Amino acid sequence: MNLKTLLMGAIATTAFAPVVLADGHEGERGRDGQVNIIYWQAPSILNPYLSGGTKDIESASLVIEPLGRYDQNGALVAYLAQEIPTVENGGVSADLTTITWKLKEGLVWSDGSAVTSADVKFTADYCMHPEGGCAQGAKFDGVSSVEVIDDLTVKVTFSQPQPNPYGPFMGGQSPIIQAAQFADCLGAKAPECTEANFNPIGTGPFVVTDFRPNDVIQMVANENFREEGKPAFASLTFKGGGDATAAGRAVLETGEFDYAWNLQLAPDVLAKMAEGGKGQPIAAFGTLVERLEMNLTNPSPDLPAETRATVAEPHPFLTDFNVRKALSMAIDRELLVEVGYGQAGRPTCNLVPAPALYASENTECLTQDIAGANALLDEAGWVDSNGNGVRDKDGVELSILYQTSTNAVRQDFQALIKDWWSQIGVETELRNLDASVFFGGDPGSPDTFQKFYADVEMYANNFDGTDPQAYLSAYRCGNEPKPSSQWQGENINRFCDPEYDALLDELARTGELEKRGEIAKKLNDMLTKDSYTIVPLVDRGRVSAHANSLGGVILNTWDSELWNAADWYRIGN
């Protein structure tokens, strides 16, 4: 099956049918030896609450787990919980203000100690601590309390009715951490707990034996894993770093690795690799959007450390709506897709491209308009007053530092966008940073995407499940990364609009699906076409690859890609 056929099928179904294991793939835990995974963005931490980077969230998902996950179709499935709470089974209150979770009986951590509801409550306390910075804080938006009912039961109470109460403890972004291990890691102390953050005790199929940040993780099968005979692999190597090209070759051409994630490669490059015959690409569309974030704060290094890139210092020119809109108008999204993704991408104006219920009908940005962008800047008073080719106003020049992670496709995008922006009188300096650092959560690094010491940055992320409420809540006022939050927070561009926050609250209390869709579209538009603080570029299909000898793989665009690694096995063993 060629890549085009594979991806077009993925567009129609968004996921693949579950794999049915053949006879002979049951047996003792660890029977299939070693499995090797490669992510060209290397993990820097194994605590999703201290990093928004996908590579950190997904590597950690092999070790620590949530109460429930989203399967390959976006459906909710129980993991550590006995069942998914609903109104029908009594787990969600009729007034939608509480959700009560019950843990499976007999669960133990990898160290042999019991998993209890106290661990679940502690996880909430950890992320919601007022003196700490939690990268997944939006998951707990609207939570007023978390209460232990008994050893296996925990009750979450919301400040208002929540038609979608599945923010806390659902999906790879919100796993349960062990209270005993993290007890001394609350608030500002969280980043200091190196042992816990690098070697979390978990309930997942694997246990960390050695973690080298930004390089490699060694794991072995969890002997206390709850499912008999799983995982099939006795040991796992998770290699990080390098680039997408090397990762693809390692699976598709040389067979050195069994699974390669996020093959962000030009379509002709990937098709040529697939001819190597050692593995096969897998793909599906979900909610992954490559976009530009416009910094609404001033990242100048001349500012004091305590106010640089914070709301105390507005950006000198990106606070002008006309500038942000002109930058968007100058971009040819169709060409970006052709150059970077082919059938694995679609031009988009939306931060939330799917499911269809939540996708705005906005298509305004899809037509490049260089002339219109120039006219808009002229009208707004941005002119080249000294003839140096760069527009200016009141002594401020439109000179942009544009950063992203190191990746061939992203550098192609940077080059194209720099050229288009030069045609509207904008000077652009390009910076690319090692992905392991850029998407890391080190509060001491100046180069993380959260710290945002640049004017514009480009990246992609998505959300667990099919409901965008928590994702859109990331842009609530006060949720921006800042020194007092250890530079954690999801509101990357420092957007703040009380009307947006009020609409978020309305979404949180709205149960009727069509109405939820209408509100989510308005929120999406407020971030994109109404403000251009986020400039979407490409709705990216997720493309990864696995060895022909690796069975049980089910690509999941709604949760961690490694969500069912416990079910993987070696074909032919």
Image: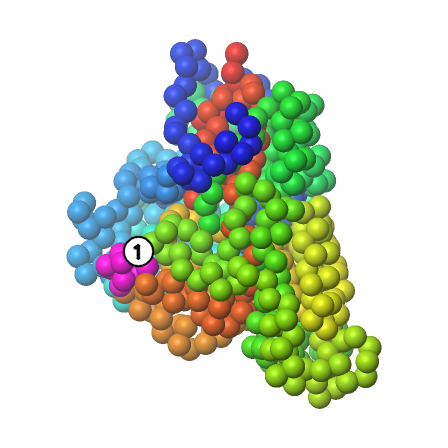
What is the x, y in percent for residue 431? 74, 59
In the depicted view, which residue is nearer to us: 1 or 246? 1
Q: Mark 1, residues whose alpha carbon is within 10 Å: few (<14), some, or many (≥20)?
A: some
- Rendered position, 254 above or below 439: above
Please report the residue visible at 71 percent of the width from the left and 76 percent of the height from the top: 398
Instruction: Using the rendered image of the protein, determine whether residue 421 is visible from the camera's viewpoint.
Output: yes
Report the magenta stretch's main SS.
Answer: helix
* Whole-percent x, y for residue 194 in the image: 62, 50
- Extreme-bottom residue of the structure: 394
The secondary structure type at the circle numbered 1 is: loop
Residue 82, quarter of picture: top left
- Does residue 20 appear left or right of residue 326 in this picture? left
Task: Report the magenta residues as a range.
Answer: 510-517
Percent x, y for residue 251?
64, 27
Front-lying residue, 46 or 504: 504
- Residue found 58% across the figure and 37% down from its top: 261
Residue 557 in the image, given as x and y percentages of width and height: 46, 42
Vertical relation: 399 (above or below) 233: below
The residue where tag 1 is placed is 164
